[in-house]
Amino acid sequence: MLIQLSPYLNKRNCCRQVFLLVTLFFSCHNPSAAQGGRYWDQNLNSEAALLSGAVVAGEGGIAAIYYNPATIPEMKKTNLSLSANLFSTYYFKAKDALGVDFPADRFQLDIYPRIITLTIKPQKNPDFTIEMAYFTKSNEYMVINKGISSEGDIIASNPGNEYYTGEYYVRSKYQDYNGGAGFGYKLSDKLAVGFTGLISYKDDQYYNLITANAFTMPGPDPSDSRQYLSDSRYHIKYNMYDVRLTTKLGLHLKQNSWSFGANINLPSVKVFGNGTVVKQYEYSNIHREPGNTAGFNRYYAGRQSGCTAHFKDPLSIAAGANYYSPSGRSILLFTAEYFFGLKPFDYIEANHDPGEEGYNFSPAEPQEWLSYSGSQEPVFNAGVAFKRYLRPELMISGGFRTDFRYMDNSDEQGFLENNEKGYYPLNVYHFNSGLGYNFNRGSIILGMQFSYGQDKNQQQVINLSEPVEYISETILPLTGPLNNQVLIRYYDVTIYFGFLFNFLNK
């Protein structure tokens, strides 16, 4: 096969065509998406989860280091605690995302995050409390593997029908581990302040492959070896990690039957991190002009390791209030948090020099071909919950919270100079309830959370059910025109069976 690279003399126009071409593939590569495109997707431990995370004003238990460090002094004893949860199962379906009556869907089981904490109450300073913790904030994994075959007259220059096969494959894995210490100090019986410093390790791995083929099979005559083949292919993979410092300042105030809490999450600070990116696009024997029997071939590719990676966390402010009934048996909780936006930035920052392990066979410079950018919109989330003690050792709780996306679909289209990591971000709503039983050395919590999200009239990822030999430089050859007809639904059922054991309590 003869491979033709576009001339570099008309570099600017060719660059625009290439980036128009890859627009399609970044419109929704990862439907579930690393980082989910939401901030309130996960809760840290079972106790806080069944209160919808509305624990900024207290009742967060061992997760106080995460929700509000000023509530750390609410833990009365030195202890070593482990909170282990059960699992969640979700179903995601994007109707017509890969073509007419060809959805991108996934049913999956996930293990919910864990948290281990050590709380220290110095005897010489009982108003000062230290909490050290290690927890998994996020552990997401998704695979979608879909294929289709058909028969029809796709290639005008080849008489008769051709066989057609199309394949779509995406695999994404994202993990966020955190460890550090929190400090809480009681200025008085009513007022406390706190500080948390955590080291966050985020790891993102992504692989996407789209192939389309139109071909004929050799005839029954062994001497007839004639066979026609046109194909196209798009392939991208990267792995990246980023180590960052996250800090939080908290305030906790008690007043009669009320408690109030507030915290400020400062923007995270990068410590170190990098990644490797590979991107390839090719097609062969494609007739781009009607009536022109000459088949065109293209191959663009690039690879670079040691690219700087950025998983930025924005500034956010949270506030909450808890009301305690006069009997002390019922609690009503409310929390809201505002996340500031982030201007467009490169979360994979490629360099001009591809390096010894890299290469660049594209009409664009390596930093243009392999850098990926994104931005984050401002988001306001809120949650409300209740807790009631049926007996001193038995309680029931439940709640509701919003989980709005910080990515906007409209921002994923129309770029020419930068790649963007895009997907189908959804607004999700979480409902939960459960029971808790306290004993001398810990507690057991059993509960369930139901989550739901929906969106419609989104653009297709690819159209493999209506293939056309060639449409334009913005659409992969041997695929069909893209339509805004995708309906996305997301369901998640999480089962909590939290077991909290205080190893050091007597």
Image (cartoon, helix red, strand yellow):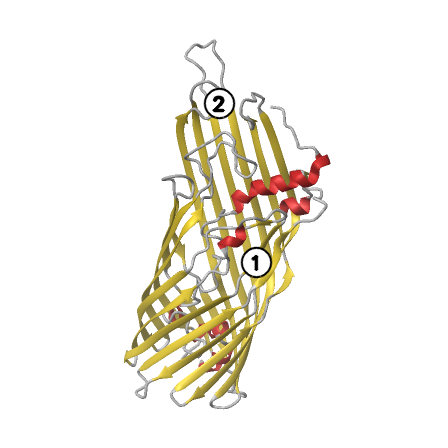
Q: Amino acid at mark 2?
A: Ala
Q: Is residue 450 above or below residue 57?
A: above
* Side of 479 where 454 appears, left or right: left
**x 60%, y 53%: residue:** 373
Q: CA distance from mark 1 to mark 2?
A: 43 Å
Q: Is residue 51 above or below residue 146?
A: below
Mark 1 lies on a secondary structure that is strand
The residue at which mark 1 appears reads as 375
User: What is the quadrant of the N terminus in the image?
Assistant: top right
Quadrant of residue 18 within the rendered picture: top right
User: What is the quadrant of the C terminus in the image?
Assistant: bottom left
Q: Is residue 210 above or below residue 46?
A: above
* Side of 91 where 416 appears, left or right: right
The residue at which mark 2 appears reads as 156
Q: Position of residue 147 (x, y in %)?
A: 42, 36
**x 67%, y 38%: residue:** 363
**x 50%, y 38%: residue:** 210
Front-lying residue, 380 or 225? 380
Tell which tag, 1 or 2, sits nearer the viewer. 2
Mark 2 lies on a secondary structure that is loop
Q: Amino acid at mark 1?
A: Ser
Question: Can residue 289 be seen from the camera position used here?
Answer: yes
Q: Position of residue 50 (x, y in %)?
A: 36, 69
**x 43%, y 28%: residue:** 164
